């Protein structure tokens, strides 16, 4: 549910204070990004590359610190900005990769299960807040993670970018995009089928290698209903690439187009 929670929480983290007059002179980044706690619920795929869906709910929170630093947590994902700068941010990343187990598809269920694991890494980002004329907030960066605990394997690098624009003092729209590259270990664990697994499942053998794994796009809408409460909704669209899309696990039993959607509510302070 990480993808779903990022949709419903990212707007709270980007523009949750922007119902104030955004053209006000002297408004700081801390005014636009306050503390919040929220809960999101939605639908996403059972496993990475699946065509079957599941529903769930997860929490999220963001705590602003001095000098533009912050800590944020969205379900299985957490990061922190540890530097003080008007535009740059950088810090650690932790992510619980959910794996593939107890799946609905009877063929994929014969493949070895992939348990949960912890990924650790870091990110570097840049943001800009336009306060005059037509206001907006843009953000871009790159994140790198590596499996450190549990059953998951491999490393990934993911550049990202987003923009948020207020349509009024209480209604905001956002759009984000990015892509991911993963190494041999990640791709082989998630998408390869060896001889023994092919014999059991009936799927053809396949050896996945490193390369671009996905490109994604998300639109979202946030509505500040009062001084302390905000609602959000969004869709996360992924298109699998390369060996991720060509693996029989996806091409014959799943779908290279992955869709997640959710709604959320957040309390601001």
Image (cartoon, grey):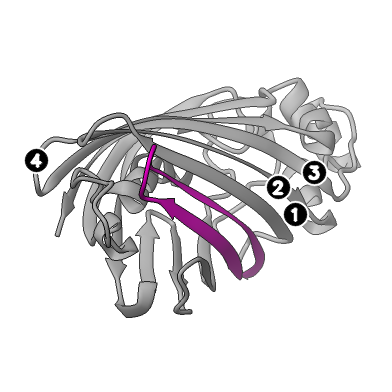
Indicate which label's residue lies in the foreground, 4 or 3: 4
Q: Main secondary structure of the magenta part?
A: strand
Distance between the alpha carbons at the discs numbered 2 and 1: 12 Å
On the image, numbered disc 3 is attached to which residue? 212
Q: Position of residue 148 (x, y in %)?
A: 63, 72
Residues packed near mark 1 inside 10 Å, few (<14), some (14 to 19) or many (20 plus): many
Q: Identify the secondary structure beneath mark 1.
A: helix
Residues packed near mark 2 inside 10 Å, few (<14), some (14 to 19) or many (20 plus): many
On the image, numbered disc 2 is attached to which residue? 180
Name the one closer to the observer, 157 or 14: 14
Distance between the alpha carbons at the discs numbered 3 and 2: 6 Å
Residue contact between numbered discs 3 and 2, judged by CB atoms under 8 Å: yes
> Which comes sooner in the sequence, label 4 or label 1?
1
Q: Residue at x 50, y 58 (%)?
A: 127
> Which comes sooner in the sequence, label 4 or label 3?
3
The tag on residue 226 is 4
Q: Residue at x 20, y 45 (%)?
A: 21
Residue contact between numbered discs 4 and 2, judged by CB atoms under 8 Å: no
The tag on residue 186 is 1
């Amino acid at each position: 549910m990480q993808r779903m929670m990022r949709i419903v929480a990212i707007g709270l983290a980007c523009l949750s204070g922007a119902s104030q007059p955004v053209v006000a002179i002297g408004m700081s980044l801390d005014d636009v990004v306050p503390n919040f706690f929220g809960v999101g619920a939605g639908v996403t795929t059972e496993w990475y590359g699946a065509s079957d869906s599941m529903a769930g709910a997860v929490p999220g929170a963001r705590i602003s610190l001095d000098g533009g630093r912050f800590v944020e947590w969205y379900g299985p994902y957490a990061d922190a900005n540890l530097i003080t700068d008007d535009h740059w941010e950088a810090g650690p990343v932790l992510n619980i990769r959910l794996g593939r187990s107890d799946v609905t598809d009877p063929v994929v269920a014969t493949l070895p299960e992939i348990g949960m694991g912890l990924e650790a890494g870091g990110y570097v980002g840049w943001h800009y807040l336009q306060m005059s004329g037509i206001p907006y907030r843009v953000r871009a960066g790159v994140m790198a993670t590596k499996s450190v605990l549990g059953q998951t394997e491999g490393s990934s690098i993911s550049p990202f970018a987003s923009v948020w624009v207020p349509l009024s003092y209480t209604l905001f729209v956002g759009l984000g995009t990015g892509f991911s590259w993963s190494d041999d270990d990640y791709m082989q664990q998630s998408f390869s089928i060896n001889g023994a697994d092919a014999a059991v499942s009936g799927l053809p053998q396949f050896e996945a290698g490193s390369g671009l794994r996905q490109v994604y796009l998300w639109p979202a809408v946030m509505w500040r209903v009062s001084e302390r409460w905000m609602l959000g909704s969004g869709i996360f669209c992924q298109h699998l690439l390369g060996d991720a899309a060509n693996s029989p696990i996806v091409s014959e039993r799943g779908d290279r187009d992955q869709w997640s959607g959710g709604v959320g509510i957040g309390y601001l302070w």
